[in-house]
Amino acid sequence: MLETSARLLELLSLLQLPRDWTSSALSERLGVSTRTVRADIGKLRSLGYPVDARPGVAGGYRLVAGTAMPPLLLDDDEAVAVAVGLGVAATWRLGVEETSLTALAKLEQVMPSRLRRRVDAIREATSVVPGAEPPLDLAALSAVAAAIRAHERLRFGYTKPGGNEEQRHTEPQRLVSWGSVWYLLAWDLDREDWRIFRVDRMVPRASTGVRFRPRAIPEGDVVEYVVRRVTEASVS
């Protein structure tokens, strides 16, 4: 039983690599028959791992995206990096503090003591300045990102620094994260010019469904452009 479990873990780690594996290649790596490989693939699928089989000479098995999030195998450095990142995320007002803490608790619960000591050492030796900005609405960020990816026009309410809310109709181009603040670079259809919006001041409306052709980013570099505009206090 232990041998089978260890083999399944090794098989899973191989399938997570960005390549296709033939039955014969997996058989050679695992030291079992191709029949056993196919049986183990079936066991992984029954556990919820979406293993895809591609036919043909260049085909094979690989792990693909599924409808649910199955457990992942992380090596030592990856596990420490994820734990440290979650710990930092929990101190920033990004709207993901609670989920970061619950994910970190789940990870530390199964983390070997040698790795927990590494994470604790980094945590105890590090001071993090909490984000001073208003908390970010993760749903708003996701809605903006989805509109950018689909090249769909975006309508949203926008709160000006003075507290007044305006309705904006834009072609969203790019999100820029700077410190604890997220900015949207968009073409303002009403003003016919580029504008920069703070996402924490936006209330996205329902998707318009109207597609647009992406425009050339001003000055060629979106980060330099946004940083310069924000520094000059030209944010909409």
Image (tube, rainbow, N blue to C red):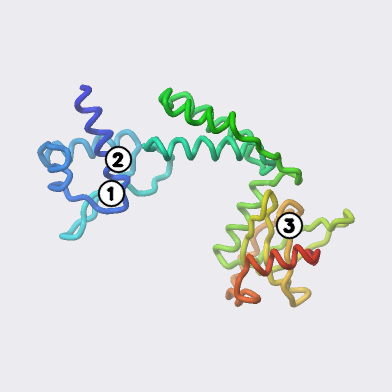
Which of pointers 1 and 3 indicates the residue nearer the eye? 3
Label 2–label 3 contact, CB within 8 A: no
Q: Earlier in the sequence, mark 2 or mark 1?
A: 2
Which amino acid does the dot numbered 2 rest on?
Ser
Q: Determine the residue positioned at 74% across, 53% down.
A: 203
Residue corresponding to mark 1: 62
The answer for how far apart the CA atoms under marks 2 and 1 are is 10 Å
Label 1–label 3 contact, CB within 8 A: no
Label 2–label 1 contact, CB within 8 A: no
Query: As rendered, which of 110 and 55 lies closer to the eye?
Result: 110
**Residue 68, placed above or below residue 201:** above
Q: Determine the residue positioned at 25% across, 53% down.
A: 20
Residue corresponding to mark 2: 13
Which amino acid does the dot numbered 1 rest on?
Arg
Asked which secondary structure carries label 2, the reply is helix
Query: As rendered, which of 232 and 64 lies closer to the eye?
Result: 232
Query: As rendered, which of 145 and 179 lies closer to the eye?
Result: 179
Residue corresponding to mark 3: 198
Q: Determine the residue positioned at 50% across, 31% down.
A: 119
In percent of width and height, residue 120 lies at 53, 27
Which amino acid does the dot numbered 3 rest on?
Arg
**Residue 168, placed above or below residue 37:** below
In percent of width and height, residue 131 lies at 71, 43
Q: Could you tell whether 50 is left or right of 5 in the image?
A: right
Asked which secondary structure carries label 3, the reply is strand
Q: Determine the residue positioned at 54% across, 40% down.
A: 85
